């Protein structure tokens, strides 16, 4: 502090009143309290005074004061702008400012000279930190600019009037390949974007108005044809906007979507085919062969829905001999191809059915058999048709046999008839013998009639002929007189129609024979058989024809039976029925362009059946390859 005092005395070379002394002391305190350095230089460039901050910044100690000149103390300043500024200020008595870098101390100084009566004062501050920060900032800005230029995003800045104030390299490429947008107005440059519903228009205005960041995706049409992901940030007096070209990503996404949709559609198609295929399809696991999956047709085999079958085992559903062994073979890796299988299934007991099956192992990655896939084609109908054909061949043979027998019988019968006539005509016959002969004659006549009828029956009509209802029905009824009587069945006939019908007579008789035989079968304990014929027209086509009804008061049929009576081999008569009668009849009627309908009731109060046969009068019937069967 003593030294300070000396410097103070230097400062004040003149005599001062005591009041001034106080003031001077306050000034010294004030100067020392300053952050900035203050020095006084005399005309000989000696430092006469340095405040505390100056002593620190310029590393001035006591020895430097009033001693060596400024240029001696800081030789690096000699010949610099600093020296010029100091000298000019001293000589011209002006205040000057300067920023300088003092290399020996690595400091940046900002100074101002002030002429004072004893020379000049230099008022300065260390701005090193500020300078560094500034240069850092410049560097950061440069780096940022570099990033802006290199990035693949387009970046633009807009002022509050939507004029372009900045475009990075990419922005120029993307948005303004033709010219410079800088300074131009966004909406003028891109008029399409001014549409009221344009997301650019809507979102930019929102960002500017509400000062909120925005983010949206938009397609910019011609001339760009680009999908952008756009982020905008308001900056207070404008907005900075980042554009990312996502056209490819979009295209890839759309492609993926399209492919996914296609795959889904294909899967749906396959699923539909799987579900509705007319082949039973199923997937089994390899332990106990549980149904994992099956289609509608496979489930139909059991009269069930697929979901009710899943989880059950193969043998539970199809207890068919040899099936287990077949599956065991597939589990061991051997497929089964077009294997004929027959048997009964649960759900439809008593029904013998036929299939052609294919079983394939489904392998896992490690080569083990993971599942068994099964495809089963039901061929029961074909099998039945096949058997029907065989059966009807046999029947045809029987028919031919019967025909030849009846032919053979006819001659001896005629002889017997003649002999009986002679016997009856001879004199002196006792009364009772005459009666027996009478009886014998009648029975022989009946046999004879049956034989000729059978013969007529079987004789294949080559050409269609004309016959009316009565001519068609009566010979058939005659055949059954015995059975009708024995069963206590009364017969009523009513032939209103006399119209001849063009038909294959023996075939139509075959149909009537089937209907009458069935009616008799249904009336084991008696009843009424009513047969009538009327002229009529076909219900839908209005073709004229004859309607024949065969009605009985027999036991009738429940709905389920009615639904199946025209199927080949459907019979409720066990060994007494073939199940072929109505099946053949239907075929015959169809070839005559006729119809055969049934109505039946099987309740205890009301039971009976009515078959209605309609035959067109003049349709030329087709010949069938089905030989007429005798039922
Ligand atoms: P089948 O007489 O050999 O059984 P069909 O084809 O002639 O074969 O008849 C099939 C089935 O139709 C019969 O088993 C019987 O159940 C039923 N049916 C046919 N006609 C009648 C009828 N008039 N009354 C009751 N059931 C009948
Ligand atoms: Mg029958």
Image (cartoon, rainbow, N blue to C red):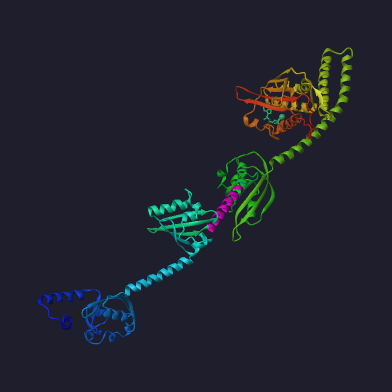
Residue 254 is a magenta residue: yes
Q: Residue 18: x and y, percent?
A: 10, 77
Q: Residue at x 63, y 57 (%)?
A: 332
Q: Give the magenta-colored segment's residue range.
A: 247-269
- Image: 424 above or below 206: above
- Image: 613 above or below 20: above
Q: Residue 154: x and y, percent?
A: 48, 61
Q: Can you say which quadrant of the picture contains the C terminus?
A: top right
Q: Residue at x 63, y 50 (%)?
A: 374
Residue 591 is a magenta residue: no
Left or right of 325 on screen, residue 617: right
> Splitting the image into four quadrants, where does ligand 2 fall?
top right
The residue at the far front in this view is 92
- Image: 13 above or below 622: below
The answer, for residue 203, to whether it is visible in the render is: yes
Q: Residue 132: x and y, percent?
A: 35, 74
Q: Can you say which quadrant of the picture contains the N terminus?
A: bottom left
Q: Residue 97: x and y, percent?
A: 30, 75
> Magenta-highlighted stretch: main secondary structure?
helix
Front-most of residues 547 and 105: 105
- Image: 405 above or below 120: above
User: Which quadrant would residue 37 be assigned to in this image?
Assistant: bottom left
Front-most of residues 332 and 374: 374
């Amino acid at each position: 502090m003593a030294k300070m005092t000396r410097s103070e005395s230097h400062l004040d070379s003149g005599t001062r009143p005591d009041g001034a002394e106080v003031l001077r002391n306050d000034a010294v305190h004030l100067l020392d309290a300053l952050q900035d350095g203050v020095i006084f230089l005399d005309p000989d460039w000696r430092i006469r005074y340095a405040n505390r901050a100056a002593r620190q910044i310029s590393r001035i100690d006591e020895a430097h004061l009033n001693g060596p000149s400024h240029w001696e103390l800081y030789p690096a300043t000699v010949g610099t702008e600093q020296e010029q500024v100091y000298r000019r200020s001293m000589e011209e008595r002006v205040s000057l400012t300067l920023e300088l870098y003092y290399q020996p101390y690595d400091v940046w100084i900002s100074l101002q000279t002030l002429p004072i009566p004893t020379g000049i004062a230099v008022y300065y501050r260390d701005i090193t930190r500020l300078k560094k920060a500034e240069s850092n900032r410049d560097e950061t800005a440069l780096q940022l600019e570099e990033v802006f230029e290199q990035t693949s995003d387009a970046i633009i800045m807009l002022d509050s009037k939507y004029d372009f104030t900045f475009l990075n390299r990419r922005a120029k490429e993307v948005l303004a390949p033709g010219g410079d947008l800088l300074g131009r107005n966004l909406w003028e440059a891109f008029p399409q974007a001014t549409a009221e519903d344009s997301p650019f228009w809507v979102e930019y205005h929102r960002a500017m108005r509400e000062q909120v960041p925005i983010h949206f995706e938009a397609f910019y049409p011609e001339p760009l044809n680009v999908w952008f992901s756009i982020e905008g940030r308001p900056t207070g007096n404008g907005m900075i906007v980042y554009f990312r070209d996502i056209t490819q990503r979009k295209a890839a996404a759309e492609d993926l979507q399209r492919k996914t949709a296609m795959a889904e559609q294909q899967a749906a198609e396959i699923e539909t085919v799987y579900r509705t295929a007319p082949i039973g399809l199923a997937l089994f696991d390899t332990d106990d062969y549980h149904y994992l999956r099956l289609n509608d047709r496979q489930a139909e085999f059991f009269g069930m829905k697929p979901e009710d079958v899943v989880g059950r085992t193969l043998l539970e559903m199809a207890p068919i001999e040899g099936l287990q062994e077949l599956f065991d073979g597939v589990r061991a890796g051997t497929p089964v191809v077009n294997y004929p299988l027959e048997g009964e299934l649960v759900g439809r007991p008593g029904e013998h059915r036929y299939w052609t099956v294919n079983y394939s192992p489904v392998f896992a990655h490690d080569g083990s058999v993971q599942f068994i896939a099964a495809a089963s084609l039901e061929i029961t109908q074909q099998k039945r048709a096949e058997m029907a054909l065989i059966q009807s061949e046999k029947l045809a043979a029987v028919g031919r046999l019967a025909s030849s027998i009846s032919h053979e019988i006819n001659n001896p019968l005629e002889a017997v008839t003649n002999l009986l006539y002679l016997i009856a005509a001879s004199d002196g016959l006792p009364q009772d013998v005459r009666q027996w002969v009478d009886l014998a004659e009648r029975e022989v006549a009946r046999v004879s009639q049956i034989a000729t009828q059978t013969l007529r029956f079987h004789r294949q009509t080559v050409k269609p002929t004309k016959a009316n209802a009565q001519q068609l029905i009566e010979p058939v009824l005659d055949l059954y007189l015995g059975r009708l009587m024995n069963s206590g069945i009364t017969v009523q006939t009513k032939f209103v129609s006399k119209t001849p019908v063009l038909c294959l007579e023996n075939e139509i008789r075959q149909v009537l024979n089937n209907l009458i035989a069935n009616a008799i079968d249904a009336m084991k304990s008696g009843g009424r058989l009513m047969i009538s014929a009327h002229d009529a027209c076909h219900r839908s086509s209005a073709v004229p024809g004859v309607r024949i009804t065969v009605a009985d008061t027999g036991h009738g049929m429940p709905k389920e039976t009615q639904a199946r009576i025209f199927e080949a081999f459907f019979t409720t008569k066990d060994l007494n029925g073939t199940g072929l009668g109505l099946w053949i009849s239907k075929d015959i009627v169809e070839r005559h362009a006729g119809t055969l309908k049934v109505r039946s009731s099987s309740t205890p109060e009301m039971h009976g059946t009515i078959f209605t046969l309609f035959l067109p009068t003049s349709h030329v019937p087709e010949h069938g390859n089905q030989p007429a069967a005798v039922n």
